[in-house]
Image (spheres, rainbow, N blue to C red):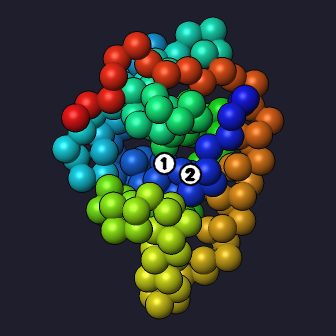
Amino acid sequence: MEKLPPIEKIYEAYSAIADNRVTLMKESAAVLSSNREKEYTVTWENGVYTSNDNASYWRGYAGYPIIAVLMLQKKLSLNSDIIDYFKGINWTELNKKYKAKYSEAVEEVMDNLNRKNVNVSKIKEEVEKVYEEIKALNIICRRSSARPPK
């Protein structure tokens, strides 16, 4: 992958999968935002992935919709032991609260899990493993021809 996403997008991808917000089709997927107000389209063909989420469209890196699709396609690891910890997290609200400082949004989620005696070190190890897989992934990410939904 040419331009790497922020590692925090992996947490958001886990949430999309945990909340069943990803619908895979033959050559595309529909991914609902965490507040379910927007639907993004991910497409792929010959190792080229596109998405109309804001990160993929405006920033040029794989946003969480592409990462979630890659996990479901088994091109990236998806650890079933940790997935349930990411159910029901409104990343839209958190990212707005922290003014798109994704690390602070993740920190709040991890702090909440830690207070529930969840082994957050294991979660961070898994996310770092996926990030290394992203670095090694031989795909191209491009902006979609469709603009992000409003």
Q: Residue at x 33, y 22 (%)?
A: 147
Q: Which residue is mark 2?
A: 10
Q: Which residue is mark 1?
A: 13
Q: Position of residue 142 (x, y in %)?
A: 55, 21
Q: Position of residue 4 (x, y in %)?
A: 68, 40
Q: Quadrant of residue 120?
A: bottom right
Going by the numbered disc 1, the residue's amino acid type is Ala
Q: Residue at x 49, y 43 (%)?
A: 64
In the image, residue 91 above or below residue 106: above
In the image, residue 76 above or below residue 29: below
Assess whether mark 1 and mark 2 are in contact (beta carbons under 8 angstroms): yes
Q: Residue at x 53, y 51 (%)?
A: 9
- The N terminus: image quadrant: top right
Q: How dense is the environment of label 2, judged by Cα within 10 Å: few (below 14), some, or many (20 and up)? A: many
Going by the numbered disc 2, the residue's amino acid type is Ile
Q: Residue at x 60, y 16 (%)?
A: 48
- The C terminus: image quadrant: top left
72 or 41, nearer to the observer:
41
In the image, residue 23 above or below residue 26: below
How many numbered marks are there? 2
Answer yes or no: is residue 113 visible: no
Q: In 3D space, how far apart are the residues under numbered discs 2 and 1 (Cα atoms)?
A: 5 Å
Q: Quick one: SS at disc 1?
A: helix
Q: Position of residue 146 (x, y in %)?
A: 34, 17
Q: How dense is the environment of label 1, judged by Cα within 10 Å: few (below 14), some, or many (20 and up)? A: many
For this view, does 56 lie left or right of residue 39? right
For this view, does 119 lie left or right of residue 145? right
Answer yes or no: is residue 146 visible: yes
